[in-house]
Image: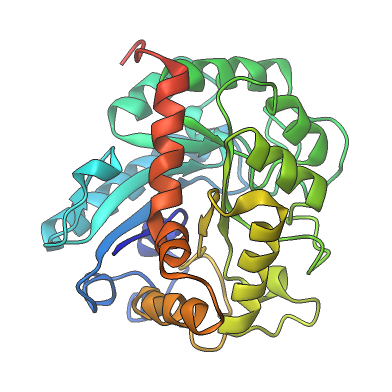
Amino acid sequence: MLICDTHADTLWAMQSPRRDPNAPLDVTYEHLRRSADVRVQTLALFVPTGGMEQRPNVVERELQMLARLKAQGFRQITRLEEAAADAPNVLLSVEGGEAFGGDPAEVDRLAGLGVRMAALVWNNENGLAVPAVRSDDGGLTALGRQMVARMRRARMALDVSHLNRAGFWEVLDGQAPPLASHSCAYALCPHPRNLDDGQLRALFDAGGFVGVNFYPAFLSPDARADLDTVARHIAHMCELGGEGHVGLGSDFDGIDAHPLGLNNAGDVPALLAHLEKRGFGRRLVQDVAGRNFERYLQRLDACQGPKAGV
């Protein structure tokens, strides 16, 4: 089975000077190789609050961590058709538009390094967009719109997981469909980081994708979660028309708590087994596991035409 996870902060965790180097990681070679499944793990180049001036050092350190993972046996891919079962496969993403350093041309450089998706904003305003945790109003800036246009030329998916509602509706413009790499359903847990039913329906109708986040605070109002809590968010999205558009977006190595039974990437097959026990058909489980994300990237490539500038 193809299993894709559309968001993890492992590269940031590996290079962070604040992290205990002996602390275990959620995403490791051993965890991803625990089963015979074809595993694809998206790893974010994350630039946190701190301004554009920190961008070059943070991104380069994270790229050094990627090189370290490759030395351990990880394989970087840019298309899911390239994924193989003999080693963990890595897709690159960006979380926080500071990674572009205010220069739309930097989109092309990062696309050339294999970045397939990017979020303009994290939890802080950065001159590109307003985050969901700050305000529903404001959306994208003029520079943010330039970045989106450049991303679409480079076949880089726009990630709306941290974008506010105004920005969400602005980028749902009938062009290349965005994705939410690590978000949950607001109807089940009313957190500003989650997407409401109207947003979810519109995203699915547009051909987009949602990777369900494993962070308990996004899954349940009391921040207590288990395998079935995650399954309820997946089922709710399927009921809204998302059977062909929902997948997994763990947020591993970026979360400080986990659902019971989902402690690390090695536990993801247990979630898929739970979906089957809950009544999800085998084909739907395979779609949620990875095929929906694969089809999303195929739709993205088909609607954006030839790659430009990379």
Query: In this image, 91 relative to 261: left or right?
Result: left
Q: Residue at x 14, y 63 (%)?
A: 72
How many marks the image carries: the answer is: 0
Name the residue rendered at 79%, 60% in the picture: 186
Residue 268, placed above or below residue 142: below
Q: Quadrant of residue 138?
A: top right
- Quarter of the image with the C terminus in it: top left
Residue visible at 35% across and 12% down in the picture: 306
Residue furthest to the bottom in view is: 260
Foreground pick, 292 / 40: 292
Q: Is residue 181 above or below residue 72?
A: above
Q: For the N terminus, give its image quadrant.
A: bottom left
**Image location of residue 4, percent across then percent down:** 38, 57
- The answer, for residue 114, to whether it is visible in the render is yes
Residue 15, percent from left and from top: 37, 59
Asked if residue 17 lies left or right of residue 144, the reply is left
Q: Which quadrant of the structure image shows residue 305?
A: top left
State how the image is colored.
Answer: rainbow
For the residue pair 280 and 16, the one nearer the viewer reads as 280
Q: Position of residue 191 (x, y in %)?
A: 80, 62
* Left or right: 259 as drawn, with respect to 283: right
Residue 183 x/y as whole percent: 64, 56
Question: Is residue 197 shown above or below 111?
Answer: below
Q: Is residue 184 visible?
A: no
Q: Residue at x 42, y 62 (%)?
A: 283
Question: For residue 167, what is the image quadrant?
Answer: top right
